[in-house]
Amino acid sequence: MLLSHLLPFLSALPLVVLGRQVPRVPTDDAPSPNQAPVSPVVAGQLRVTENSGICETTPGVYQASGYGDIASSKSIWFWYFEARKNPASAPLALWFNGGPGSSSMLGLLQEHGPCRISNDSKTVSLNPNSWNNEVNMLYIDQPVGVGFSHGDTEVGTSQEAAADVWAFLQIFLKNSKFSFLQTNKLAIWTESYGGHYGPSFAAYFLSQNDKIASGSVSGVHLNLDVLAIGNGLTDPLTQYPGYLVYAANNPYHPLVSDSVIAEANSSWTASDGCKAQITACNNGGNTTVCSNAQSYCNSNILLPLKGDWDIHYVPSQDPDPYPAGITDYLHGVASKIGAESDWEETSITVYSNFADTGDWMRNSRQDLESVINAGIRTVILDGDADFILNYVGVEAMVDALNTKFTSTYKQQNWSTFNVRGQAAGQYKNAGTFSYIRVYGAGHQISAYSHGSLGTGEASLQVFNQIMSNQSLSST
């Protein structure tokens, strides 16, 4: 997790990954002795291990894990947990971690899945605030090469990732075990680099639906109803100045000295600095321009301004050991859940692919605006203790949105978000759009608690309200 550990082998790459963990270099290319044997891969098939008894131990609750083979050399890993209540009619929520290249098993085991990793990194306990209490949850490792997914690692842009996820969902929803979900509402929940993934995926799904309706594409209509992004990177040009502000003034403590902030500010404003490079990237810049912008801005602004504090949770010094790692646990259960490859937190190959294309610095705000304007209920969340995608930058991005709800949003005052009568954040609603800043939460919002609330209790209230097609409100 310590960023400085990356320097010896990522010197040619941008140095930050937008997931809880940073990439690690595999120490052994041999497969884990606990993984399942690789089954024959046939494009278009879904290979399923049912009711493994791992993680979800609530009696009578169905689970399934396995692979959707989107090509003969590309297999995407999934882990599905039906809702603990009324699964036949419950919505289906997709979960994607960021990175780019980080496994969605992080969200499952460290945040909001049916079980949560223990501090020993080897055992789990049942999670009472799991998101599958009332919603069918589908955790997906993507792109290919991430987590337990395996095969050709070709994807290097959010748009390419969207096409592969759509192909996977076509296979998943056509399977007889899950075809009942075709008519249920569908939601995308994501975080971190999900600020790129979420808008790109949602916009692609909607465009494919239009093509299906016109007859130009054959497939299952995706009943998309919700888009949610936690601590997301969407519009770098608008968000990067937030590092300068947050480092000096946040709810916890200054992160660095005034001199470090001044130097970073010079790197932002210089004629060939970060602002100029991001602008050039989004004004038709090629992949080299955008990739160089990522490397320069992260090396001269993002990383220096974090100081000695954990980049994902600034109340703690770097590295914060919480949440506990999940590698040992997953290696121990791999064969039981049908996993065929050695699990890693983040794929260096996939991360490098995205770094090479400069996808990081490209603006996804236009896709986000189009999704909001299409009537998809959308919520943006941010934990106030996260630096790497801090609320100052995210709120600047939200304020810059140009949608049918923009004028209404700007007229709103902040409201306190109470959970069981306890202040857990502040929020605004405008039409089917909502934003919330969550108190006491780091980068992985559901991994944290505030006051006397339970771990993930505040984000569960957000989740349930949005999934019930409601604006945010206090309880």
Image (cartoon, helix red, strand yellow):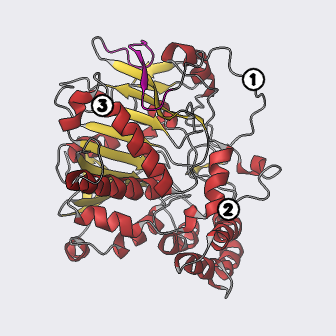
Q: Is residue 134 visible?
A: no
Q: Residue, x 38% and y 58% (percent of image)?
A: 199
Q: Which of marks 1 and 3 is in front?
A: 3
Q: Residue, x 21% and y 70% (percent of image)?
A: 405
The amino acid pointed to by label 1 is: Ala
Find out whether residue 48 is within the magenta segment. Answer: yes
Nearer the observer, 275 or 355: 355
x, y (%) of residue 372? 26, 63
Graded by Cα atoms within 10 Å as few (under 14), some (14 to 19) or many (20 or more), the crowding at tag 3 reads: some
Which badge, 1 or 3, is on the more N-terminal residue? 1
Residue picked out by circle 2: 303
Graded by Cα atoms within 10 Å as few (under 14), some (14 to 19) or many (20 or more), the crowding at tag 2 reads: some
Left or right of residue 23, residue 163 in this image: left
Q: How far apart are marks 1 and 2 (CA)?
A: 34 Å
Residue picked out by circle 1: 30
The amino acid pointed to by label 2 is: Leu
Q: In this view, does 66 lie above or below 259?
A: above
Quadrant occupied by the C terminus: top left
Magenta residues span: 42-58
Residue picked out by circle 3: 174
Q: Which mark is residue 219?
A: none
> Which element carries disc 2, helix, strand or loop?
helix
Q: In this view, does 318 lie above or below 41?
A: below
